[in-house]
């Protein structure tokens, strides 16, 4: 799905700075990803999104994930779950 395609190198570099700025391109990327997330979550049953770090970062930013690093290694499964009106993420081992 196009809405869940990865970001450009420019956006990735902005997001991974020590103090990222929410430039318009980064904001547009996050909004596009969240539109894709809404579409995917509207499907019946559990949803599996296979993606790279930019998508993970967008989920963490948009859902205001606490106590979870936005930077993950390759081939790591992250479970996003809404509990008590708050989104949470955990690494599945």
Image: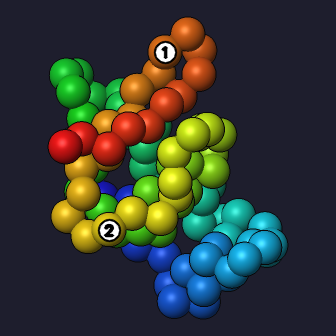
**Mark toward the viewer: 2 or 1:** 2
Along the horizontal axis of the image, is 83 left or right of 28? left
Residue identified by numbered label 2: 73
Q: Which sits in the foreground, 62 or 16?
A: 16
Residue identified by numbered label 1: 83
Identify the element where label 2 is drawn.
Answer: loop
Furthest toward the top, the residue is 84
Quadrant where the C terminus is found in the figure: top left
Residue at 43% x, 43% y is 37
Q: Which sits in the foreground, 42 or 60?
A: 60
Taking 65 as reference, is 14 above or below it?
below
Taking 13 as reference, is 89 above or below it?
above
Note whether residue 5 is visible.
Answer: no
Tell which circle, 2 or 1, labels the residue nearer the N-terminal end.
Answer: 2
Q: Alpha-carbon neighbours of circle 2 within 10 Å: few (<14), some, or many (≥20)?
A: few
Along the horizontal axis of the image, is 22 left or right of 46? right
Expressed as whole percent of the image width and height from the top left, the position of residue 79 reads 32, 37
Residue at 39% x, 63% y is 72
Numbered mark located on residue 7 in the image:
none
Expressed as whole percent of the image width and height from the top left, the position of residue 48 reads 22, 42
Specify the color scheme.
rainbow
Taking 54 as reference, is 1 above or below it?
above
Quadrant in which residue 32 is drawn: bottom right
Marks 2 and 1 in Cβ contact (< 8 Å): no
């Amino acid at each position: 799905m196009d809405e869940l395609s990865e970001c450009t190198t420019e956006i990735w570099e902005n997001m991974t700075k020590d103090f990222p700025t929410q430039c318009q391109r980064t904001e547009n990327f996050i909004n596009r990803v969240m539109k894709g997330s809404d579409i995917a979550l509207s499907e019946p049953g559990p949803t599996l999104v296979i993606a790279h770090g930019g998508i993970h970062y967008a989920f963490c930013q948009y859902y205001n994930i606490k106590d979870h690093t936005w930077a993950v290694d390759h081939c790591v499964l992250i479970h996003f779950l809404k509990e008590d009106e708050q989104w949470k993420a955990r690494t599945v081992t």
